[in-house]
Image (cartoon, coloured by chain):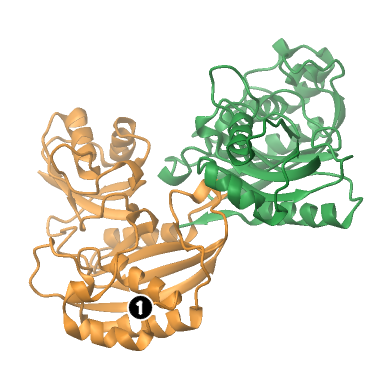
Chain colours: A green, B orange
Amino acid sequence: MARYRLKISYDGTHYSGWQVQPNAPSIQENIEKAFFKLMGEKVRVIGSGRTDAGAHALGQIAHVDFETPFPSENLARALNHLLPRDIRILEASECEETFHAQYSAKQKIYHYHLWTERFVHPFVRLYRHHVAMPLNLDKIMEAKGYFEGRHDFTTFANVGSGVKNNVRTLKRITIVPQEGGLRFEFEGEGFLYKMVRNIMGALVEVGLGQLEPCEIPRLLEGKDRRLAGRACPAHALFLVSVHYPVNSSKEDKCENLAEKDSATLSLST
Amino acid sequence: MARYRLKISYDGTHYSGWQVQPNAPSIQENIEKAFFKLMGEKVRVIGSGRTDAGAHALGQIAHVDFETPFPSENLARALNHLLPRDIRILEASECEETFHAQYSAKQKIYHYHLWTERFVHPFVRLYRHHVAMPLNLDKIMEAKGYFEGRHDFTTFANVGSGVKNNVRTLKRITIVPQEGGLRFEFEGEGFLYKMVRNIMGALVEVGLGQLEPCEIPRLLEGKDRRLAGRACPAHALFLVSVHYPVNSSKEDKCENLAEKDSATLSLST
């Protein structure tokens, strides 16, 4: 028995999310099937967390235990031959048996992409949320400050995740202008179910003048999902990277690669 | 009757190319249908030239004549409401009746994208040709020089375009390193059927050591398509921009926009 750590990128457009579920295609199920085809062994691939139906990942991290001896350097290539082209194993390497993709995770980075110009370019249509009306960026900047820090995020969490404590530390929301609109970078220790999309929903409302930034503390204090508006859609959400404590040179290497990839992947046309 | 100039971007993945043909979806047909729905008028949309089945465009130019009075500033938006999301009219403006999208064109720029790393990222899988073996860039640089300039390109043109004179001036091939591989920029006065993809086929053969750069003059002089190897696939080919003589302030404006777009469109994730 050996434990392997996987770094995975996927286009979630055609999937019902990360997690295995009956009668719907998931990322997790596809990877487990690829392992079964490769090794004849039924494995469970444990991700750092779920991603929503339609959401994407540049650097999802998972771990998997299996018995079959398999040369580590060929594992990613062999799995990719068996996977659909919208799921790629970018790295696969043996790791400590104490490593756990979900419980060892210390930080995650998500990006959410708004397209604010008149027409969405065909090549990004599947990866941008189109808000064609003018946004007040000053108010969005003011509003995002109320979300940063340690808060009870019950108002911005959908039920269904099964967790009881909704207090989380949202380290930062960074807003970066990019081609056609804005990228919202979320970094935090942990995120509740639909938390990024719900916060984005509020930030867009603020930008459109439908919500005042100073109302956000009241919404947070109310601890009631019904106080806040609708979530932004999943197709513009990317899990960019998952970060772990650096306790071995092997993990150190993975960590740096994850950061490099997330910063530089681009489609230059 | 008024003549309009259109600037069009499309993801060609699901189309059989620009040109209308029986029993296959084309870009031209979809735009003509949108005009018919909008105005109840059957029009012919004349493009700067065909693009192959599966090839894409960032800045295809077309012209169209119609009788129905329609406010110019709303035309692009109205057409986009009626078009599939993988076809966008980026600009639509009234132009001189002497303007002809095909015959007035003076230069075209195409880009061809090679992915040379081990695994193709899911988000560019539809827009890159994957060559996973090491390429000799020095030899490719040497080889591309033989294609630049004025030549009879019969060896690198598929039959079917109906033209008799296969002499063309290929102004430049510029090779630009980019995420995951290389972008080949082709600029010329005019291109023969499958010419960019056939030249790319030869350049990849050179990069793989299957063809020597010094053999290319002999291939060109032979004027026989059978002398050269296979074309590279269409899905990595983009028509980036079409350039016209600057003879009015209106056209000058369009020209600059076309260049800006082609240089900056990117999918930052």
Judging by the rendered image, the residue that carries numbered circle 1 is B172
Q: Quadrant of the N terminus of chain B?
A: top left
Label 1: how many residues lie within 10 Å, few (<14), some (14-19) or many (20+)?
A: some
Residue A228 location, quadrant:
top right
Image spot of residue B155 (x, y percent): 20, 75
Q: Is residue B185 above or below residue A122?
A: below
A250 or A186: nearer the eye? A250
Image spot of residue A14 (x, y percent): 50, 31
Q: Is residue B178 above or below residue A18?
A: below
Q: Secondary structure at mark 1?
A: strand
- Left or right? Give the position of B194 relative to A180: left
Q: Is residue B261 above or below residue B199?
A: above
Considering every residue shown, the one lying at the far right of the view is A247
The structure residue drawn at horizontal position 56% and vertical position 34%, both measured from the top left corner, is A12
A226 or A140: nearer the eye? A226
Label count reads 1
Image spot of residue A212 (x, y percent): 70, 24
- Left or right? Give the position of A31 relative to A13: right
The structure residue drawn at horizontal position 37% and vertical position 40%, both measured from the top left corner, is B86
* Mark 1: amino acid: Arg
Q: Is residue A75 above or below residue A130?
A: below
Residue A135 at least partly seen? no
A132 or B269: nearer the eye? B269
